[in-house]
Image (tube, helix red, strand yellow):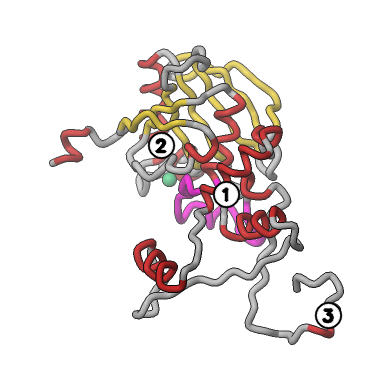
Amino acid sequence: MADPGTRPGDLVRPGHVLPLRARDGGVLERPRPAEAAVELCTRAGLAPAAALATAVDEAGEVAGPVTLAALAERAALPVVRVSQVVAAHRRVAPSLQAGPLRAGASATLPTAHGVFNALGYAGDGAEHLALVRGDLAGPAPVPVHMHAECVAGDVLGSLRCTCAARLDAALAAIDAAGRGVLVYLRTRAAPGVGPVHALRGCAVVDENATALAAHVLLDLGVRSALLLGDDPGVGAGLPGFGIAVAGHRPLLVTPAADAG
Ligand SMILES: [Zn+2]
């Protein structure tokens, strides 16, 4: 597949190779293995095509970091994390730091927690929102909440999830701090997936969503974030984009209750 001279007749079809298409925006748009592998090949002056393999452990489960490290050691293989490819990409191509999103319209948004400046960011098939309060420039960590759109919770107030409560608590926390930003990450509808399907489960702020949020935060001048949220894992990818994580502050779970 990596040979430009290959014709369809050269390939056995159907085969056991599952093709993945890397996004044109690369690791900055979607920091996943396919994009990282293509980037490594491109850097090496090779065709932008790579073979990916998922390693499994002795039990047949997808290998975790410890198993992978042992395998790499045994086979003398180098280990490169996707976040390292992202970081290297940013060093080489700082002009791409702005990422795939473009700032669009802005509007003043009065809420139960005061007035926010709402900014739209379009570019990946959905328009994401940043609700901004106060001055975000300067070295002091900026309170940041990244929220994945949940129609059931955010709009309809579903009690099956805590999305609506977290959204409200985040805006309240930013209001109390006097500055901060809530990045509202819209869900791009998958083909054949209707709105009712979206009511069955909440989207999460995964690596892909974190990358989009990072672009928004960089555009707003945020270089250090105090993350508002109950999942300490959310935002782990931000440092790869040059945004320091100064700490976490729970929204619904108090630290004392959490410890107990
Ligand atoms: Zn929800």
Q: CA distance from mark 1 to mark 3?
A: 32 Å
Q: Are marks 1 and 2 in contact (CB under 8 Å)?
A: no
Classify mark 3: helix, strand or loop: helix
Which quadrant of the picture is home to ligand 1? Answer: top left
- What span is in magenta? 189-208
Furthest residue toward front: 76
Q: Is residue 221 above or below residue 125?
A: above
Residue 85 is tagged as 1
Classify mark 2: helix, strand or loop: helix
Mark found first going from the N terminus, 1 or 2 = 1
x and y percent of residue 243 in the render?
49, 31
Dot 3 alpha-carbon crowd within 10 angstroms: few under 14, some 14 to 19, many 20 or more? few
Location of the N terminus by quadrant is bottom right
x and y percent of residue 118 in the render?
58, 22
x and y percent of residue 142 in the render?
44, 22
| Image point (37%, 68%), residue name | 70
Is ligand 1 closer than 8 angstroms to the Cβ of mark 2?
Answer: yes
